Amino acid sequence: MGRKDRRANARSVRRSHSSATPLRAPQFDQIKDVFAQATAYYRKRDFASARSLCRAILQRNSQHVRSLVLLGDMAQQEGSNNQAIKFLNQALALDSQDTAAHDNLAIAHQALGRRGEAVRHFMRAIALGLPDPELLVKQSAQVAVPLKRCLDAWPRHVQLAELCGAQGVGAIANEALLLALMQSKPVFDIELERLFTTLRRDLLRVATAEGSNGLDSDELEFYCALAQQCFINEYVFALRDGEREQLQKICDRISDALATGGKISVLDLIVIASYLPLHGLPMASSLLDHPWPGALERLLTQQVREPLEEKSEINDIPALTAIDCATSLQVQEQYEENPYPRWIILPSVKPTTIADYLLETIGLSSAALPTATHDVLIAGCGTGFHSIETAQLFPKSHILAVDISGASLAYARRKTRAVGLSNIEYGQADILKLGSIDRRFDLIETVGVLHHLSDPELGWRILLSLLRPKGLMLVGLYSALARRSVTATQRFIAEHGYRPTVDDIRTCRQNLIVRGQVPPAKDFWSVSGCRDLMFNVMEHQFTIPQIKTFLDANRLAFLGFEQLPAGVLRQFQHQFPDATAQRDLAAWHDFEQAHPRSFINMYVMWVQKED
C-alpha cells in the first residue's frame, strides 16, 4: 500500500491547486522557514512548488536530509519509484536513522516488486519508531478484507478459502509491512492477533490433512513470518480444542524423521515453529545440517541457532555475587524461565556526551554535570537492550552490566556480539549484594529493577555507595497511581487462581480480552511481558512524595523525568510555564494527581549525587 493510500485511509487530506502567484526566491539564511513553506505546499499536494523549494534548498545545502526525504516521498507518490529510491538512498547516506526515509524507501521497493528490500526497510522503520504500524497494516486492502471476514465470523473458525478466496495468503504475503511487523516485535493489536490465530489453526488443519501439497513461495514467506511472530511473543496466542492433539501428531512425525534420518516436511516444520520453539525438539541441532529455503533458514536461525548459541553462553558468564536471598531466588527463577524482554532489532543511536544527552532529553544544561562517563553500571540489564543502547550512546565508556538471570545475560551477550560492541562487560549478580564489589562508577542506570527487590530502598542505597561524588543515576520505578489498572488486573488473577505458567497466562489474557480489561501496556502482548507486568513474584509501587523523601534523605538532586508519553511534557509546561518547574517534584506531584496516567510506563528520573 502506498503512502497516498495510507493517508487517505488515516485522515482526510485537503487538496488544492498551486497559487498562480510565482514563488519568490527563498532567503537562504532561513532554510528552516523555506522547508516549512515546502512542507505546506506538499500538504496541499502542490508538489511542483514543494519540489522547487526543496531543490533550491539543496543547491545551498546538499546535505539537507529533510529535503531529500520529501523529494523521495513525492516521487514515490507520483509513481517514479526509481527516482524516489535515488533521493531516499541519498538521505540515508547522510542519516541512516531517518524513519520516514526507510518507510518511503520500503514503499518504493514494494511498488517495484522487491519484497525482500521492502521488508528490510520496513523493519528498520519499525525499529526506529514508525508510528502505529499495526494501524497502517490494517488499512491495507490486502489485509483489511480477510481481517473483516475473520472478525465478522469470530469466534467461529474460518478456513483459508473463506478468508482469502482462491488467492490464499498470497495477497497478504505481498504486504511487506505486515511481514516486517511480524518479524520485528510482538504485534500490539487484538484484531490482528485473531487473524494470525485463525491462519495458524488453518495451517495446522492443512498439515494434518491427507494429500497436503506443501507451500508455494509466497505462502512460505508468510507462514515463516507468522512462526517468527509466534516465537517473538513466546506463543501467547490462544489454543482451541483439538489443536494440541493435532500438533502432537506432527511433533511425532518430525521426531521420527530426525531419529531415522527420514525426510522432513517444510510444512510440518513451520507448523511446529508456530506453536512450539524448534529448539525444543529432540536432536533439533540436526535440522541445521539440511539445506532449506531462505525463509525457513531465517526461521531456523531464530529458533535453533540463536537459542543454542545462548545456551552455550551461560557457563561463561562470571558470577559477581552470591544469589541466596529467598525473594531474589524467586525473581531469578522467573527471569530464567522467561528472559525479558525478547527484543529483535535495536536501532543504532548516535554517539554523544552525557551533557549533550541530558540537554536533549530533559532540557538540562548545568556546569555541575560531568563531562564524561568513563565507568558505567547497568544494574539489572535484562536481555541487553538498555546496556547496548548506552554503550552506543557513550562509546568511550566502559560498561559493567549485571543481572540476576543467566538466561537474560546470555541473550544480552549474543546481541552485543551481533552489534559488534566491545565496551560492555556482563556479570551475574544480586543488586542487594553489589556492595561487595570493589568498583566505583560515574553513571549508574537501574530502570524497572529496584521495585522487584525485597527492599527497594536498601538496593538503591547500595547502588549509591558505588557512585562517585557528583555521579549521575538513571532510576525507573513503578507509579502507584499510574498502575491502578494493573493492580486491578493482579487482583483478578489472584481471585481466579491463575499461575505464572504459559497455559494460565494464555487463558488469563483471553479472559481479559473478552472482558474488555486489557491493561494499557505493551507487555500484554508476550508471555514474558505478561509475566513481568501482571504475575511478578515481587512488586513495589511508589509515589512522588515517597521518592522526594528518599532523595532528600540521601543527598540526591532531582534533575528531571524522561521517557514520558507523548504530550505529557507539553501539558506540564502549559500548567507550569516556569522553566525551573521541570525540576520541582512538588509540581510533578500536583500534575500527576490531575493526570494519573502520566507515568504509565514508570517514573524514569535522572538524579545526581551531591557529594
Image: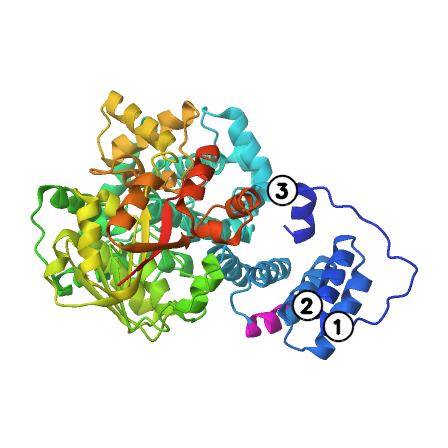
Q: Are marks 2 and 1 in contact (CB under 8 Å)?
A: yes
Colour approach in the figure:
rainbow
Number of other residues with Cα within 10 Å of mark 1, as a class: few under 14, some 14 to 19, many 20 or more: some
Q: Which residue is mark 2?
A: 67
- Spatial CA distance of label 1 from label 3 is 34 Å
Q: Quadrant of residue 250?
A: top left
Q: Residue at x 37, y 63 (%)?
A: 389
Q: Please, what is the three-letter code of the amino acid marked with disc 2?
A: Ser
Q: In screen coordinates, is 178 left or right of 279?
A: right
Q: Is residue 414 visible?
A: yes
Q: Are the two marked residues, 3 and 2, in contact with CB atoms closer than 8 angstroms?
A: no
Of marks 1 and 3, which one's residue comes earlier in the chain?
A: 1
Residue type at mark 3 is Ala
Query: Which quadrant of the rendered structure holds the C terminus?
Result: bottom left
Would you name the residue on which mark 3 appears?
141
Question: Who comes first in sequence, dot 3 or dot 2?
Answer: 2
Figure check: 569 above or below 286: above
- Secondary structure beneath dot 2 equals helix
